[in-house]
C-alpha cells in the first residue's frame, strides 16, 4: 500500500499524475473514481457493427455505448496474481479511506469525460480515414503479392505506421489478410485475392463484410449517449459507500448497470437498496488454499466472506452471474471441475461464466507475483484449452453452454436460467 499518496483523507495529485499519460480519466473532487474506454469500445467505433463488440454483447451491451468505470479505483482487498492493474504501485490499501464523492457529481463528471473522449480522443475522422486506409491496403496487397511489413506498407502508401497497424489489425481480425508466425509479415487472403479484381470490388467487400461510412458515423453518434455502465474498472467497487445511490443515478438516466465484485463484502451487497441490472461475482478458486495463492488477500476470512456472498446470490432480486477468471494450472484444470460445480450449484446464479485471464499490462508479472520460474505462456489458457474445460463442466454439471466468444475466451452457461430464453437485458 502506498500511504504516501493519501494526505488528510485525500488522494494526492502526485498519485493522479501517474495516470495522466494513460487512457484513464480520474474523476471527482476526491480522486477515488475513474473511467477508461476499453479496447472493445474503440473496436466498435471502427466498424459500428456487432462484428467488433465485446463478449457482453450476449447480454445486449453495445461496446461503443458502454461507460467503464470504478468509484473506488485505488482500493482493493485482494492482490490477484492475474490482475492487469498496477497493484504493486497503484493500490492505496484494502479499505476506502478517503472522503467519498457524491454519486450525482460522479456520474455527471463521468459523462462529461466520456463525451470528451469520444469527441477529441476517439474522433470520427480517425475511423472514416481507417475505412479508406483498409481499402488502400487491400488494393496494394492485391497488386503486389507476397508478404508485407508494417514499415513497407507505411512507406509504399505514405501512411503512418500507427495508422497502417490499426487498419491491418481490423483486416486481420476479419481474415481478409493473414500474418506469418512472426506476426510481423502480412499477406492478402488467397480466397479474397481470387474473387476480387479492382478497388471498387474491395470497397464493396469491405462494405458488405466489415463496415461502411454510414455505420461508422451512426456508431459515433450513438457513443455520445452511453446506455450502459460497467462498474468494474479497477479496485473493489463495493467499497464505495454510496453504491445504491450511484446505481440509482445511472438507472435514472436509463442506463443498464453491471457490478463486478470479488464477493468479499456480502453485507454491502445484501444492503443494496438499488440493485444492478446484473451482478457479477468473481469465484477465483475452488477452495481456500488456491484462493490464498491466487488472490493474496489482505483481509482475514476472505474465503468465508466469498462463501457468504455465494449463499446470498439466490435471494437477490436481480440477474446474477458467477465468473471464474481462469489461470492455467493455477485455479483451473479438469480435476477442479467437481469442486467448482458444487459451489455454483449451491449458489444457483442465473449464469456461470469461464473467462480466460488477460495476459497484458501488469498481468505480465504473474510469474513474479507467484514467485515462480515458469514461462508466461504456461499460465495462459488459450481458447482450445478452455473449450475442453468447458466441455468437462457441461458434462459433469449439466449446465447448458449457451454462448462462446473466441476472441475473449469466454464460455457462458445457463444455471438458473432457461437456456431457450434470450439473455439480453430488456430494461435498466
Image: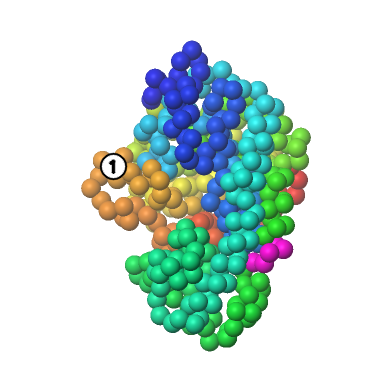
Q: Is residue 395 magenta?
A: no
Residue 400 seen from this side: no
Q: Mark 1 points at which residue?
A: 368
Q: In front: 348, or 112? A: 112
Screen quadrant of the N terminus: top left
Q: Position of residue 379 (x, y in %)?
A: 34, 52
Kindly identify the residue that appears in the image at 48 percent across and 73 percent down. Answer: 177
Which type of secondary structure does the marked residue at label 1 adopt? helix
Q: In front: 57, or 186? A: 186
Q: Is residue 411 above or below residue 38?
A: below
Q: Residue furthest front?
A: 158
Q: In front: 387, or 115? A: 115
Q: Where is residue 103 in the image (x, y as percent from the top left)?
A: 66, 26
Q: Is residue 213 magenta?
A: yes
Residue 122 seen from this side: yes
Q: Is the magenta stretch mostly helix, strand or loop?
A: helix
Tell me where residue 50 sits by quadrant. Answer: bottom right
Circle count: 1
- In the picture, measured across the screen, residue 171 lies left or right of residue 119, that is left
Kindly identify the residue that appears in the image at 42 percent across and 29 percent down. Answer: 91
Query: How many other residues sit within 10 Å of disc 1, few (<14), some (14-19) or many (≥20)?
Result: few
Q: Where is residue 208 in the image (x, y as percent from the top left)?
A: 66, 73
- Residues shaded magenta: 211-215
Q: Is residue 279 above or below residue 92?
A: below
Tell me where residue 302 sits by quadrant. Answer: top left
- In the picture, measured across the screen, residue 379 lies left or right of residue 131, that is left
Kindly identify the residue that appears in the image at 32 percent across and 56 percent down. Answer: 377
Q: Position of residue 351 (x, y in %)?
A: 59, 50
Kindly identify the residue that appears in the image at 44 percent across and 76 percent down. Answer: 187
Amino acid at each position: 500500500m502506498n500511504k504516501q499518496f493519501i494526505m488528510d483523507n485525500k488522494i494526492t495529485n502526485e498519485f493522479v499524475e501517474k495516470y495522466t499519460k494513460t487512457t484513464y480519466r480520474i474523476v471527482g473532487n476526491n480522486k477515488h473514481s475513474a473511467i477508461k474506454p476499453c479496447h472493445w469500445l474503440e473496436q466498435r467505433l471502427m466498424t459500428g457493427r456487432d462484428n467488433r463488440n465485446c463478449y457482453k454483447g450476449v447480454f445486449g451491451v453495445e461496446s461503443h455505448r458502454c461507460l467503464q468505470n470504478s468509484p473506488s479505483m485505488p482500493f482493493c482487498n485482494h492482490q490477484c496474481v492475474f490482475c492487469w492493474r498496477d497493484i504493486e504501485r497503484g493500490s492505496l490499501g484494502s479499505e476506502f479511506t478517503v472522503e467519498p464523492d457524491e454519486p450525482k457529481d460522479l456520474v455527471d463528471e463521468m459523462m462529461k469525460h466520456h463525451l470528451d473522449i469520444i469527441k477529441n480522443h476517439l474522433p470520427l475522422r480517425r475511423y472514416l480515414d481507417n475505412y479508406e486506409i483498409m481499402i488502400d491496403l487491400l488494393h496494394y496487397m492485391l497488386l503486389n503479392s507476397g508478404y508485407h511489413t508494417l514499415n513497407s506498407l507505411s512507406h509504399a502508401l505514405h501512411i503512418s505506421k500507427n495508422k497502417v497497424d490499426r487498419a491491418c489489425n481490423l483486416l486481420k481480425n476479419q481474415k481478409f489478410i493473414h500474418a506469418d508466425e512472426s506476426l510481423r509479415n502480412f499477406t492478402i487472403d488467397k480466397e479474397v485475392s481470387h474473387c476480387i479484381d479492382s478497388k471498387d470490388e474491395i470497397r464493396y467487400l469491405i462494405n458488405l463484410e466489415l463496415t461502411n461510412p454510414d455505420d461508422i458515423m451512426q456508431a459515433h453518434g450513438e457513443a455520445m449517449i452511453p446506455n450502459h455502465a460497467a462498474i468494474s474498472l479497477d479496485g473493489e467497487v463495493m467499497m464505495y459507500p454510496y453504491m445504491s445511490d450511484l446505481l440509482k443515478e445511472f438507472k435514472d438516466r436509463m442506463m443498464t448497470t453491471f457490478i463486478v465484485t470479488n464477493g468479499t463484502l456480502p453485507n454491502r451487497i445484501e444492503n443494496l437498496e438499488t440493485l444492478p441490472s446484473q451482478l457479477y461475482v468473481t469465484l477465483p478458486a475452488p477452495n481456500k488454499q488456491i484462493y490464498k495463492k491466487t488472490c493474496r488477500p489482505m483481509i482475514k476470512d476472505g474465503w468465508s466472506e466469498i462463501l457468504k456472498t455465494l449463499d446470498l446470490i439466490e435471494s437477490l432480486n436481480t440477474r446474477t452471474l458467477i465468473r471464474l477468471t481462469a489461470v492455467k494450472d493455477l485455479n483451473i484444470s479438469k480435476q477442479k471441475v467437481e469442486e467448482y460445480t458444487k459451489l455454483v450449484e449451491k449458489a444457483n446464479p442465473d449464469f456461470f461464466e469461464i473467462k480466460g485471464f488477460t495476459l497484458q499490462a501488469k498481468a505480465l508479472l504473474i510469474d513474479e507475483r507467484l514467485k515462480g520460474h515458469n514461462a508466461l505462456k504456461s499460465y495462459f489458457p488459450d481458447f482450445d484449452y478452455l473449450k475442453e474445460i468447458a466441455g468437462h463442466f457441461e458434462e459433469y454439471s449439466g449446465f447448458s453452454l449457451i454462448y462462446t466468444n473466441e476472441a475473449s475466451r469466454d464460455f457462458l452457461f445457463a444455471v438458473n436460467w432457461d437456456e431457450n430464453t434470450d439473455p439480453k437485458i430488456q430494461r435498466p
